[in-house]
Image (cartoon, grey):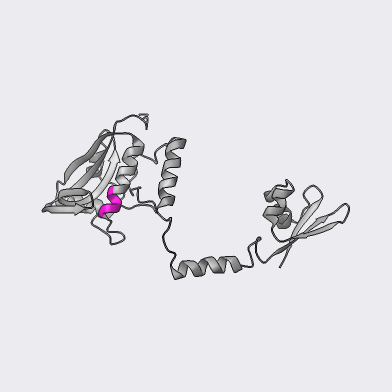
């Protein structure tokens, strides 16, 4: 079955543990029982976990409970909107895997992908505008945040790294026909100013073969 990601047929669902009633509040999200899984999908996706899956700890917990409470937190969403909401709830509630909360979700670094992938629920096919919005959102999370001492040290070490072509290396550029030699410290800038492919220039160093009669060699 082919699913159009822009159709408002997607939803976000939450698995709750009936053994643990109470008031569970995570930021703007509130539940009457403790949540232990959050996902998104369409059709019968919310019930797929009851038949098994690859997230063993999650499936074992379902078997122990017997019949979990499944709520549909939001319906009538596009794939992109469900993708974003799923990530927000995951982040607010927290995961067992990194000891931040009760969720059994196994997520990637962006906090939006689960360990069980249904064949119709791969990463959403975003439009260019949606990709741009998501990229801006992710980058804004780190704007203005102070860098740790360890982070600053890594940045400083990177600048001093002798393997970096833009810092302590000097590049020797030799015309194999006229034998004219030029030196530069920044090969990227040199290639840009002279309308030369940086990739081709680096390849001459790696393979020791001139590119259009020019050799590019770095000198430490």
Is residue 217 located in the magenta-colored stretch of the structure? Answer: no
* Magenta-tinted stretch: 89-93
Q: 137 or 12, which lies in front?
A: 137
Number of marks present in the image shown: 0
Residue visible at 34% across and 36% down in the picture: 79
Let me know if residue 87 appears in the view: yes
Q: Quadrant of the C terminus?
A: bottom right
Residue 121 appears at what percent x and percent y?
35, 39
- Quarter assignment of residue 77: top left
Residue 148 appears at what percent x and percent y?
43, 67
Residue visible at 27% across and 56% down in the picture: 94
Let me know if residue 200 appears in the view: no
Q: Is residue 130 above or below residue 172?
A: above
Q: 74 or 3, which lies in front?
A: 74
Residue visible at 50% across and 70% down in the picture: 153
Which secondary structure type mostly characterizes the magenta part of the structure? Answer: helix
Residue visible at 29% across and 41% down in the picture: 40
Residue 95 appears at what percent x and percent y?
28, 56
């Amino acid at each position: 079955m082919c699913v159009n990601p822009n159709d408002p047929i997607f939803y976000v669902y939450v698995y709750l543990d009936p053994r643990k009633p109470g008031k569970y509040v995570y930021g703007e999200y509130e539940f009457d029982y403790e949540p232990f899984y959050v996902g998104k999908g369409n059709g019968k996706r919310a019930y797929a976990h009851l038949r098994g899956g690859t997230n063993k700890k999650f499936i074992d917990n379902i078997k122990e409970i017997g019949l979990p409470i499944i709520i549909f937190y939001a319906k009538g969403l596009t794939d992109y909107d469900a993708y974003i909401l799923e990530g927000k709830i995951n982040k607010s509630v927290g995961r067992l895997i990194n000891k931040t909360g009760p969720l059994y979700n196994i997520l990637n670094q962006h906090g939006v992908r689960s360990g069980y992938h249904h064949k119709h629920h791969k990463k959403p096919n975003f439009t260019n505008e949606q990709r741009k919005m998501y990229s801006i959102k992710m980058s804004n999370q780190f704007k203005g945040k102070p860098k740790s001492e360890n982070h600053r040290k890594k940045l400083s070490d990177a600048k001093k790294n002798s393997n970096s072509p833009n810092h302590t290396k000097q590049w020797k550029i030799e015309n194999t026909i006229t034998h004219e030699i030029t030196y530069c410290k920044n090969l990227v800038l040199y290639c840009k100013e002279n309308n030369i492919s940086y990739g081709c220039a680096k390849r001459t160093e790696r393979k020791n073969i001139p590119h259009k009669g020019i050799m590019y060699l770095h000198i430490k």
